[in-house]
Amino acid sequence: MCKSSQLHAFLHALPKCEHHLHLEGCLSPTLLFALSAKNNIPIPSDPSYASIATLTERYNNFSNLNDFLAFYYRALDVVVSVDDFEMLGWEYFTIANRDGVKHAEVFFDPQSHTSRGVSLETVVSGFDRACKRAEKELGITSKLIMCFLRHLPVQEARVTMDEAVKGGYFDGEESVISALGLDSSEVGFRPEIFQEMYVEAEKRGIRRTAHAGEEGDPTYISGALDGLHAERIDHGIRLIEDADLMDRVIKEGIMLTVCPLSNVCLQVVQHVGQLPIRKFLEAGVKFSLNSDDPAYFGGYILNNYCAVQDAFDLSIAEWKTIVENSIQGSWCDQARKDELLTMLKECLSEHAAS
Ligand SMILES: Nc1ncnc2[nH]cnc12
Ligand SMILES: [Zn+2]
């Protein structure tokens, strides 16, 4: 709940688009223990995994991105079947629906599963089922974004991409996987390393984004733009450190997918008020607000909207800008964007009348 309960209702009602959400980051301690029991796969012996409560407590104390990622990858051992992946995806969509998400472009990390002997087909089939069910039962439209793990050798990304192409999942915006992303440990793993795959994806009509400027300096952002032809930047908050690059991002209309609670949990900033939200709004940098790995970072998208409101006391006009930009920066078709813009207009009128 936000400090202002009237604004909480308004933020709740806004038609949200989420662009930075790792489906694997929705594996809550409760679901981890449930899948461990169901699949008879032991929980790690580390004392942090003694109970749901100790694990939740450990999740409140990440020291940085790599500290978090070790828990994120280890937890995945319990996710093995198509049903498990569907359950994980469905966990996200049901909570996203509660929070007012209408359109979601969600990441998944195939290499974190294929390295354990789980096939790409199993992963994609399960997540795709969750996406289709979300559209049918909740009216949430979605896209799947396949991410390469940048800490692994580039040849392994090549193998993953070849497999996606061979499986018929990766050929144009309308295919099961409609976009490419890049995630995992950032510093030391520059975006340009993955250029070859991004060039091929562009030729295939695949949309492109990359994590950059989360822990890495602004050259990681320019590297993703120049080297990968990224159309969006995930996180990107360190853009604020380079005025010329910021001008370029504004001119080219590149949208950042900002994740406020994630940045606090991973100690990129000490509190949400330190994020350049107001500076981005004043300068005209487009951004959406997102939850990243909500099972680990203490909140889903509405918690992120509320945290920004509590820290910056934004006006209704500023929220209109944020939500409009997040609709326009989505990769859905124009008809869907028009529907979302109409929902936004209705939400604003209702708020004005209240
Ligand atoms: N915040 C994040 N940054 C990089 N890789 C990730 N994988 C899951 N969450 C991530
Ligand atoms: Zn992320």
Image (tube, grey):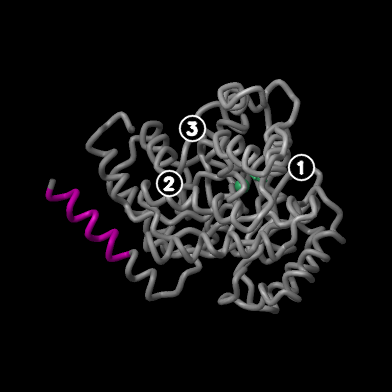
**Measured from the top left, where is residue 166 in percent x and y?**
76, 76
Which circle's residue, 3 or 2, is located before the other in the chain? 2
Of the pair 21 and 133, the residue shown nearer to us = 133
Of the pair 316 and 121, the residue shown nearer to us = 121
Q: Please check the rendered image and state whether residue 232 is part of the magenta-colored stretch, yes or no.
A: no
Under mark 3, the amino acid is Val
**Measured from the top left, where is residue 280 in percent x and y?**
48, 47
- Residue 272 has which mark? 3
Of the pair 290 and 193, the residue shown nearer to us = 290
Is residue 290 visible in the rendered structure shown here? yes
Give the magenta-colored segment's residue range.
341-353
Q: What residue sits 58% from the left and 51% below the top?
A: 23
**Measured from the top left, where is residue 158 in percent x and y?**
82, 65
Q: What residue sits 57% from the left and 42% below the top?
A: 293
Q: What residue sits 77% from the left and 56% below the top?
A: 114
Q: Which residue is mark 1?
A: 187
- Residue 95 has which mark? 2
